[in-house]
Image (cartoon, rainbow, N blue to C red):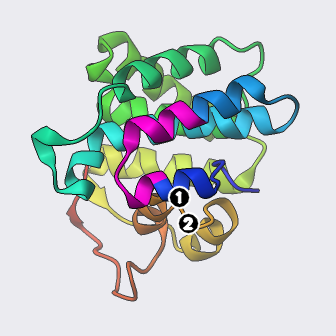
Amino acid sequence: MELFYFDMVLRSCEERFEWDHALEHLQTVYRKSKGSNISLILNSLIGFSWYYLIEGPIVSKKYEKDENTTALDVWRKYTDIGLSAAQPDSALFFVAGYTLSLHGYYLGEEYEKKGHLCIEQCMNHCRNAMIRQLARCFFENENTLNYVPLKNGGEICAELFSGTSLLDRYFTSIYSETRNGSPPRKGAVSML
């Protein structure tokens, strides 16, 4: 079970640092989708828009000249759509909770609070044990302000993150017990 939708168009956009084009493409795919793929694409819209907003300028090394004009609006729109769904799924609770807990203040104070509630919901009610472990690890790291990866993070990340997108690699670097072959940085100051 992967958490994010990713295709060749998105790969090409990421290689060229075309964040706005990537989000336009994802929105088109979302509008045309039906069935089970829809939640995967919704997770991607929330996660990728947040990632491109926060990390995009750093990844592209363009900083203030980065092509990133739609990410904030896309993040807000699809977070609202996802959280207002009759039954948001566990993956959405994790993705929305993670992004909003870290940077929800960009959208408004109420969003940061929603993020914390989503993580709690995920920790306490998620049926997927791997996603529940990610949520618990995030919660513990946030409360201790220490980066401590999951003991079985490599296996969980291999299952949930394909490793092909920038966002997949970001989460793998956070939760895997090794970071590019290096030992974990236990006790290091968190990225939070």
Return the x and y of residue 116 as percentages of the image width and height: 44, 28
Whether residue 192 is visible, yes or no, is no
| Mark 2 Cα shell of 10 Å, populated few (<14), some (14-19), many (≥20) | few
Q: Cβ–Cβ below 8 Å for labels 1 and 2? A: yes
Can you name the residue that lies furthest to the right here? 35
Q: Position of residue 101 (x, y in %)?
A: 38, 32
Q: Is residue 188 magenta?
A: no
Residue 187: quadrant of the picture: bottom left
Specify which label sits upstream in the sequence, 1 or 2. 1
- 19 in the magenta segment: yes
Rendered position, 47 above or below 71: below
Q: Find the magenta span and give its range.
A: 13-25
Task: Provide the secondary structure element on which disc 1 rests.
Answer: helix
The image shows residue 132, relative to residue 76, as above or below, that is below
Residue where numbered disc 2 is placed: 164
Most foreground residue, 18 or 43: 18
**Residue type, label 1:** Arg
Within 10 angstroms of label 1, few (less than 14), some, or many (20 or more) residues? some
Residue plotted at (54% across, 14% down): 80
Give the camera-side residue of 69 and 173: 69
Left or right of 191: which side holds 1? right
Residue denoted by label 1: 11
Overall secondary structure of the magenta stretch?
A: helix
Hey, which residue is sitting farthest left in the picture?
A: 64
Q: Residue at x 85, y 37 (%)?
A: 36
Taking the spot 70% from the left edge, 55% from the top edge, the residue there is 2
Q: Which mark is residue 123?
A: none
Q: Nearer the viewer, residue 181 or 116?
A: 181
Name the amino acid type tagged 2: Thr
